[in-house]
Image (spheres, grey):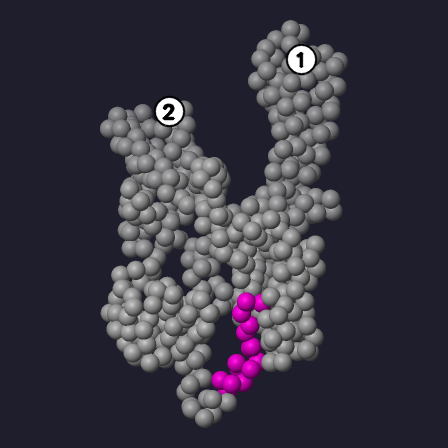
């Protein structure tokens, strides 16, 4: 049963799998067929000659979409399952609540609305399947306006929730009040639904005129809703135009902090001179499924690509780390400043590391994590490396020394700089660290292991990491005995799957 669930999960949620590509090709074909069928049915329906066979065929297609939607939602794995160390009692809640939130993603909502066309009165929702075609076919490869629109709503969803909640309260209070005031005195308001309909029409300043208050009290309620509607419309216009009041803007600043993002990557200290770092992050395989957050002072720089969140704040101040949900992140990258002199830049980086580690010790979620937060820091001066490690940095990248070493070695051994540059770039043959393949029996010699992994995945085994001591051994002797406590250091275009 678990293998079947894994196969369905990979088919729906793992773009690297062949089953995922095959499934999407089939879904694309069915969507195209559904759009053609919808167009024929619409044309024949205008002339009153639509046969029943088209109706039945449309129901079959909708049934396929419903099955596909149920399998996609059912095979979804909430990120909290892999992030939190949970007890059995909380697993069911995590599964149900995670899938419930997954259903509220904009494109999943579109799918749900399209499936609701199974009801005869909602046949018009079949047109939404054309949006599914745009989403699945990948029409917009380099610039996706629908994605930009979805990101605009996602970036301001707390603001929209606030405005819609305000509108809902006004409709509820206004509709209930007009019903209590006018019922029995106004034959146009016989049900509570009539009061709600009148409240919505009045708030939006549409004014159909089908229902009008007959009493003085009712007119006063109408006047209050009209004035409230003016303010509500102004609020929506302000949100849409990004010209919000300062009080509302503060809600937007706290949006990421109040969200439920986990397992994301936070880049602290980003400056416009670090643009190459963003391209490198996007090139890594995790970028497609992981939220990437830039945390730095000021407004969002113009050169920052759309996939990145921008959080304005100071990573060296403990009270502001919660803005980026650092305690729930997978890793934090500390970038050295290009504006300051190297010593000052390193001091700022080390201060950020100290602050983050101190902040994490105060969080309860730190004790519940399956894996601790991993901090990678760029250090410009070699004498500051040990200071960075003492501050809690897990991995130090000496960018200046590394770059100068490559330059010097390229003079001695021409061509090595180009080779090392390719090895460090994503999408090329680069270095990975992974677990021992399950089918390899240990102990085994390094030579035998090298042949085994090369035959299995075509990778070049370079060395070993001892998981107990954390030491790395590059190009060890062929007769070295490899045990289960070792991890593999290998060169490959893609990481090996377990």
Label 1 with label 2: CB-CB less than 8 Å: no
Please tell me whether residue 20 belongs to the stretch shown in magenta.
no
Q: Residues within 10 Å of mark 1 (few under 14, many from 20)?
A: few
Locate residue 362, reporting x and y percent. Answer: 65, 53
Residue 337 to residue 90: above or below:
below
Name the quadrant of the C terminus: bottom left
Relative placement, left or right, of 358 versus 133 is right
Secondary element at tag 2: helix
- Residue visible at 45% across and 84% down? 417
Closest to the observer, 143 or 5: 5
- Residue visible at 45% across and 59% down? 286
Which numbered circle lies on residue 120? 2
Relative placement, left or right, of 140 versus 66 is right
Location of mark 1 (residue): 180
Closest to the observer, 206 or 281: 281
Q: Residues within 10 Å of mark 2 (few under 14, many from 20)?
A: few
Report the Cα–Cα distance between label 1 and label 2: 35 Å
State the extent of the magenta-drawn residues as a range: 393-407
Closest to the observer, 42 or 269: 269
Asked which quadrant contains residue 61, the reply is top left
Name the quadrant of the N terminus: top left
Locate residue 391, reporting x and y percent. Answer: 63, 68
Query: Can I make out residue 426 in this image?
Result: yes
Residue 366 to residue 35: above or below:
below
Please tell me whether residue 404 belongs to the stretch shown in magenta.
yes
Query: Can I make out residue 273 in this image?
Result: no
Secondary element at tag 1: helix
Locate residue 189, reporting x and y percent. Answer: 61, 12
Mark 1 or 2 closer to N-term?
2
User: What's the magenta bit mostly, secondary-structure-wise?
Assistant: helix
């Amino acid at each position: 049963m678990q293998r079947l669930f894994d196969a369905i999960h990979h088919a729906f949620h793992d773009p690297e799998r062949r089953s995922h590509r095959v499934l999407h090709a089939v879904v694309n074909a069915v969507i195209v067929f559904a759009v053609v069928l919808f167009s024929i049915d619409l044309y024949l329906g205008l002339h009153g000659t639509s046969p029943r066979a088209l109706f039945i065929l449309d129901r079959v297609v909708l049934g396929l979409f419903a099955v596909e939607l149920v399998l996609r939602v059912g095979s979804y794995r909430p990120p909290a399952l892999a992030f939190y160390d949970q007890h059995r009692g909380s697993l069911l809640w995590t599964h149900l609540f995670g899938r419930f939130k997954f259903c509220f993603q904009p494109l999943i909502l579109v799918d749900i609305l399209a499936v609701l066309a199974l009801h005869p009165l909602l046949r018009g929702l079949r047109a939404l399947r054309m949006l599914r075609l745009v989403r699945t076919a990948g029409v917009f490869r380099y610039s996706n306006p629908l994605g930009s629109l979805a990101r605009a709503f996602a970036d301001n969803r707390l603001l929209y929730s606030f405005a819609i909640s305000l509108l809902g309260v006004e409709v509820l209070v206004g509709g209930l009040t007009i019903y209590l005031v006018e019922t029995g005195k106004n034959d146009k308001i016989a049900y509570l639904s009539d009061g709600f309909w009148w409240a919505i029409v009045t708030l939006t300043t549409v004014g159909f005129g089908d229902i009008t208050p007959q009493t003085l009290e009712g007119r006063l309620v109408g006047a209050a809703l009209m004035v409230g509607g003016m303010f509500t419309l102004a609020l929506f216009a302000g949100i849409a135009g990004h010209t919000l009041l300062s009080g509302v803007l503060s809600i937007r600043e706290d949006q990421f902090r109040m969200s439920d993002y986990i397992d994301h990557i936070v880049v602290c200290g980003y400056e416009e001179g670090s643009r190459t770092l963003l391209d490198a992050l996007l090139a890594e395989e995790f970028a497609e499924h992981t939220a990437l957050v830039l945390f730095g002072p000021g407004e969002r720089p113009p050169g920052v690509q759309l996939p990145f969140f921008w959080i304005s704040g100071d990573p060296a101040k403990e009270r502001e780390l919660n803005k980026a949900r650092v305690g729930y992140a997978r890793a934090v990258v500390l970038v050295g400043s290009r504006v300051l002199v190297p010593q000052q830049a390193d001091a700022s980086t080390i201060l950020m590391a100290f602050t983050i580690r101190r902040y994490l010790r105060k969080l309860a979620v730190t004790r519940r994590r399956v894996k601790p937060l991993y901090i990678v820091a760029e250090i410009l001066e070699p004498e500051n490396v040990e200071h960075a490690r003492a501050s809690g940095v897990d991995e130090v990248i000496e960018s200046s020394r590394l770059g100068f070493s490559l330059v010097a070695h390229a003079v001695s051994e021409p061509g090595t700089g180009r080779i090392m540059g390719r090895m460090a770039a994503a999408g090329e043959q680069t270095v990975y660290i992974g677990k021992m393949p399950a089918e390899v029996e240990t102990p085994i010699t390094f030579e035998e292991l090298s042949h085994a992994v090369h035959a299995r995945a075509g990778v070049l085994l370079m060395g070993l990491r001892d998981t107990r001591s954390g030491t790395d051994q590059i190009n060890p002797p062929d007769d070295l005995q490899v045990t289960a406590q070792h991890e593999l250091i290998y060169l490959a275009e893609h990481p090996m799957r377990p």
